[in-house]
Amino acid sequence: MRNDPLAWLVSLDGVGSAYAATRDGIDALLRDRGLRRTSPQDTAESLLRGAHASAVLEGSASSLAEVTQSGGDEIAQDAVRLSAELLGLAPRLATSPLQVFARLHAVAAVSAVPPDRLGRPRDPDAAARLRGLADVLLAPTEVPALVVAALVHAELRTVAPFGSHNGLVARAAERLVLVARGVDEKSLIVPEAGHLTLRAEYESNLRGYRDGGRAGVHAWLLYAAQAYAAGAEASPLRG
């Protein structure tokens, strides 16, 4: 596709093949289990596992059992609240990504941020970066949705456009891209758990994305392909 703003990402060495292999693995999981009927409970369990993993990456000390039974600590409660609203935002991502980003922050941060700051970028530079990311999501592209999800995650996490809860927002937006762009319409894989499994690599590659220029972007994308594969292994469909 001419003028595809993301085409250069899949031209990076190894990125195309890594994401093709990861997508094949995800498709095999969803196709194989699709021979049996999946239930809303499977989706709910995936979202809960993802909320717990995302909360831990954000500093929560709650276990999955604690989150399941009582909601866990404040960070975990923020993540669970966000996961409960997440899938309802999927239809809007293709037309109003800025509104979706704002809503993700408003839901995650409602217990900790004054109402007039909910969903609002922290400064004009952050607002401009959010608009740029929204423009990327609105532009036609032939780049795999998994690559788009990885880019959205890294941009939101490293730009940190909101005054708080940027990690929760970034990981929620990543899952939302996978749902909205048809990779995992029922949200049965757990990308957040993949990042938690590879936590040291996750954190170092985010720093590389922020500070390392083209090489940092390249390393993040290769890392994220591995994280999505690990997220598929963490699906409730695996038992």
Image: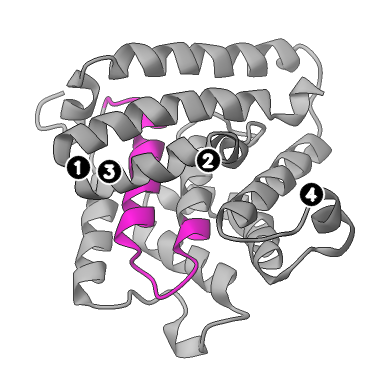
* Label 3 SS: helix
Q: Nearer the viewer, residue 173 or 73?
A: 73
Looking at the image, which residue is at 63% across and 54% down?
56
* Mark 3 in CB contact with mark 1 (< 8 angstroms): yes
**Image depth: mark 4 or mark 1 in front:** 1
In which quarter of the view is residue 44 placed? Answer: top right
Extreme residue in the right direction: 69
Label 2 CA crowd tier, 10 Å (few <14, some 14–19, many 20+): some
Q: Nearer the viewer, residue 106 or 19?
A: 19
Task: Let me know if residue 156 is in the magenta part.
Answer: yes
Task: Let me know if residue 151 is in the magenta part.
Answer: yes
* Mark 2 in CB contact with mark 1 (< 8 angstroms): no
Provide the residue designation for mark 4: 64
Q: Is residue 124 left or right of residue 233?
A: left
Q: Is residue 70 above or below residue 185?
A: below
Type of amino acid at the residue the image marks with label 4: Leu
Judged by its main secondary structure, the magenta piece is helix
Type of amino acid at the residue the image marks with label 2: Arg
Point out the tag, 2 or 4, that comes first from the N-terminus: 4
Label 4 – label 1 distance at C-alpha: 34 Å
In which quarter of the view is residue 192 placed? Answer: top right
Provide the residue designation for mark 2: 199
Label 3 – label 1 distance at C-alpha: 6 Å
Q: Give the position of the C terminus as an image quadrant.
A: top right
Q: Which residues are magenta?
A: 142-169
Q: Is residue 17 above or below residue 60?
A: above
Label 3 – label 2 distance at C-alpha: 15 Å
Disc ID at residue 209:
3
Label 1 CA crowd tier, 10 Å (few <14, some 14–19, many 20+): some
